[in-house]
Image (spheres, rainbow, N blue to C red):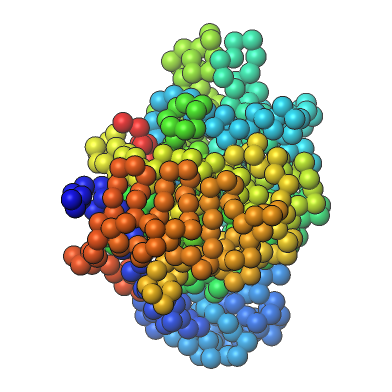
Amino acid sequence: MKPQKTKSAMWGRKVLTICALMLTANLLAFAGQHKISKDLAKNKSNDQVNVIVQFSQVPTAAHHQKVLNRGGRLNRQLGRFRGAAYRMPASALADLAADPSVLFISPDRPLRATSTGAPAVAIDYHADTVNAPAAWAQGLDGTGIGVAVIDSGVSDLLDLHGNKSGSASNVVYSQDFTGDSVNGAADQYGHGTHVAGILAGTGAMSKGANALYSFQGVAANANIVNLRVLDQNGAGSDSDVIAAIQTAIQLKDTYNIRVISLSLGRPVFESYTVDPLCQAVEQAWQAGIVVVVAAGNYGRDNAAGTYGYGTITAPGNDPYVITVGAMNTKSTADRTDDVPASYSSKGPSLFDSVVKPDLVAPGNLIVSLYKPGETLSQETPGNEVPTALYKSNGNQTASDTYFVLSGTSMATPMVSGAVALMLQQDATLAPDQIKARLMKTAFKNLMQSSVAVDPVSGQSFNEQADVFTVGAGYLDIEAALENTDLVPATAGSAMSPTATMDANGNIVLANGSSMLGGNSILWGSSILWGSSILWGSSSPLGGSSILWGSSILWGSSTPLESSSILWGSSILWGSGTVQEESILWGSSILWGSTTMQQESILWGSSTPGSLSDRK
């Protein structure tokens, strides 16, 4: 008897069909790339535009003069980055692009923090769900490891003063890139301080005789290098971030900067191979710095009919870096009931079809630090947690220290903190070795399907813990610290796999020399991810060789759209394709502000409460 197709089954079948169509569209979009970014075409010839020009080498005075000769001016030099930021006439772009030394010209694009306001409900238990206390029990707290927090700045709060060093601040260096001559690198928005608390807060203001719960950061004694790139509204630009990344590289040896934490991003406009933001993070990675990036908060965006798939933001689309999605802890310490946050952006990446995110960490309703008066606290005053949440003698009075936010921004510093702990334990680990261990040891026995309900709109969102939603799984710090496997230390040996189609129309995962995809993966004597995952370049996602978690078998031997693919215990993927879907991708999607206005999840704090997945 032929089984009936359930609503969830039909939705699931559409998702896989969409992913296949997206892969085809991505290949076509990439084929049309040239030396000028397509989104510069909207400018009129007499417009003045802010651009980033990438050259074949670090630009010299002679390279800058090429722009000046065409009516431009130098806005910012970008250190050892092979490019610089300029303002020039749009009419001169084509002529400049014809110069052999010019590799690519793109706008100096705006970007934002990847979080938003959400009302406090209960303790998030994020440290427990990722097994951070196991590291603390070993005496690991990030001591000696420098983490560059490239964000909206960091406020000087008691919880950011060293876990072992008394009154000394964890913030060992600060620099402003926004041009704020009054406030310098001090946080005016509130986002960077919240991120810093998750990463390296001591929890001092929530400890003591009356403590019910302490909001301690993952690596409470790591050194924070505060590089402010976002203004009081959480906005910045590509060139600001690139300049900050270059500064982190320059200060690497001075402050032992081994990690860069980027809880920010913007839409993807071109391949990571020419995107200046992606090229900048690759430079840091190749310099020996682990770069951890937020996946983005577009997981609810169905404007293109993709159910949020293909919405990873830059530079999280770069295959070198560790891209982090968000989970909802459901306010319990037990991670087995945790589910993907519906707003967390999903892969594959636009243009390149890179499998992202790489892993996930708690990001929903996360309690961390703030300073009263910062923009976020003014825009979402209900986000201060009551003191009764963490003190036995507390009340419903709003805390002046702790605040709640949601987003992949909050998940990112948890992974950054985990990296600091791993490097404290073994300082010889290279970025690719860190990434591979985190992905291999990630917890994989996740709930396979769930439904999130927005408490404000009442809208429901179907979520599945598939490879494009949770990557290799859920951050497990204890397991990562126990693992001793090593991939080669060479930069690029752990590049995220690429999803592509073989000659038979099956989706396969592969990535050249990467140890994370292809037939060359060696974990000791096996090619297994943990105990349950096998990713091989010769095996389609619909084939019998890929196990996801302990309960999912993606098919037996047939393509993705076949009727033999089982998803968990409740969904049977039907046969056929989704003819009614209209998938517009690549250059036909304008990711600018006009498109995003129709989505309920916006960057920043303009939709307080909308990022909560609680019923």
Q: Residue 242, percent across and down?
A: 61, 63
Residue 589: quadrant of the picture = bottom left
Please tell me whether residue 355 is drawn above or below residue 67 in the rendered image: above
Q: Nearer the viewer, residue 345 or 36?
A: 345
Total marks shown come to: 0
Residue in the image at 53% along x and 10% along y: 392
Q: Nearer the viewer, residue 516 or 369?
A: 516
> Residue at horizontal 47%, vertical 49%?
548
Image coordinates for residue 592, horizontal then vertical, percent: 36, 63
Quadrant of the image containing the C terminus: top left
Q: Quadrant of residue 91?
A: bottom left
Direction front: furthest residue = 1
Instruction: Please give the name of the residue rendered at 37% of the width and 72% of the height, measured from the top-left corner.
Output: 505
Report if residue 432 is visible in the image: no
Apparent side of residue 594 relative to residue 73 in the rendered image (left or right): left
Which residue is drawn at the image coordinates 36% and 64% (left, top)? 558
Q: Is residue 101 visible?
A: yes
Left/right placement of residue 328 relative to residue 423 reads left
Whole-percent x and y of residue 379? 40, 37
- Classify residue 329 as left or right of residue 195: left
- Whether 214 is drawn above or below 342: the answer is above
